[in-house]
Amino acid sequence: MGMTMRWIGRRSGALFAAMIMSAGLVMQLPAAAQPSPFGLDEAQLVTRSLASFETEHLRVHHSSGAEDAARAYAEVLDDAAGWLADEVGWRATLVVAVLDGDDWRALARLPFPVPHARPGETMVVIPTSIAAYPGFDIWKLDARELTTALAVHELGHVAAYDLDINRESLWVGELVANLFMAGYVRERRPDLDALLGGVPQGFDGAGAVRSLAALDEQYAGVGLENYAWFQFRLAELADAMVRARPFAEIVSGLQREFRFGQSAEEMTATLARLERIVPGSTAGIVDMTGE
């Protein structure tokens, strides 16, 4: 599910190639037409002449025929951006791309419909629907609600970057985005809790790889269904954390423990940082840590 292009850039082409191979995607575009490996920018959206509109906190570009979906996602993202301004002082204009399969394949480097963020560009890229994601039919979740929750997850990547929360660890980066999503959902939109209930019934077998260290090493190279399994688990952990401590205090803890520029460290030290933010929080992921 959601990915941040900032983490991808950190490990350069090998990690990006792993994601493409995991989806069985082969790019056939001529070299001049290849989008940036680090994701879209707003200029590409404008050049493609996508429809657009603005809200208080957003500039939204969307595919033809996707206005209803785009406005639904924008309503929630605009509210989430305002909530983050009040809660933690994050203020920015977020660029949102809501793309159908054709526009996605013409512009994006990640396989459709994998949502992703470009924190340095204050931008999120959202599919019209997550329903084509591998494994979706097993989850028995509402596609519109899940796509909306994932959009807020991507907003979390952007806000965390701007708030100087950063880690070499990819799995911590995904947990942080889920914390932003869970904090908003529990406070403002409990109807969007599709990601927060853990791995859906019948999908646990997708977790062939369960080590967070392996996720750090391979990211989406574990396979898109396995990657989704990790996201469900990390969203469940995030939900437990925001239920245990006020969101603003969690963000302060993240800024203290996972500030920009820290170097990689052993799993034990990372878990200790999480425990200082929310005591007892890592008990639910012992099967994933080897600790």
Image: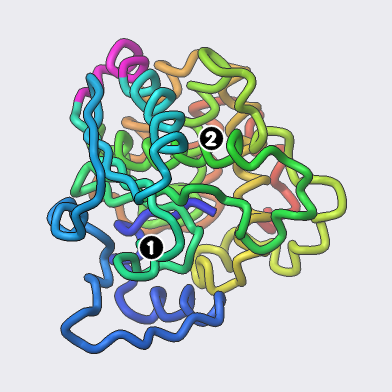
49 vs 38: above or below? above
Q: Within 10 Å of the Cα at label 1, are there few (<14), some (14-19), or many (20+) other Cα atoms?
A: many
Residue 191 pos. (x, y %):
64, 21
Whichever of labels 1 and 2 marks the residue nearer the N terminus, that label is: 1
**Would you identify the image quadrant in which residue 212 lies?**
bottom right
Q: Within 10 Å of the Cα at label 2, are there few (<14), some (14-19), or many (20+) other Cα atoms?
A: many
Which kind of residue does numbered mark 2 sit on? Ala
In the image, 279: left or right of 202? left
37 vs 85: above or below? below
Identify the element where label 1 is drawn: helix
Identify the element where label 2 is drawn: helix
In the image, 47: left or right of 173? left
- Do we see residue 176 in this rendering? no
Residue 105 or residue 141, whichever sits in front? 105
Residue occupying image coordinates x 52% and y 72%: 218
Residue 149, which numbered label?
2
Residue 90 or residue 103, whichever sits in front? 103
Q: Nearer the viewer, mark 1 or mark 2?
A: 1
Magenta segment boundaries in residue numbering: 82-91
In the image, 91: left or right of 3? left
Residue 104, which numbered label?
1
Residue 162, which numbered label?
none
Q: CA distance from mark 1 to mark 2?
A: 20 Å
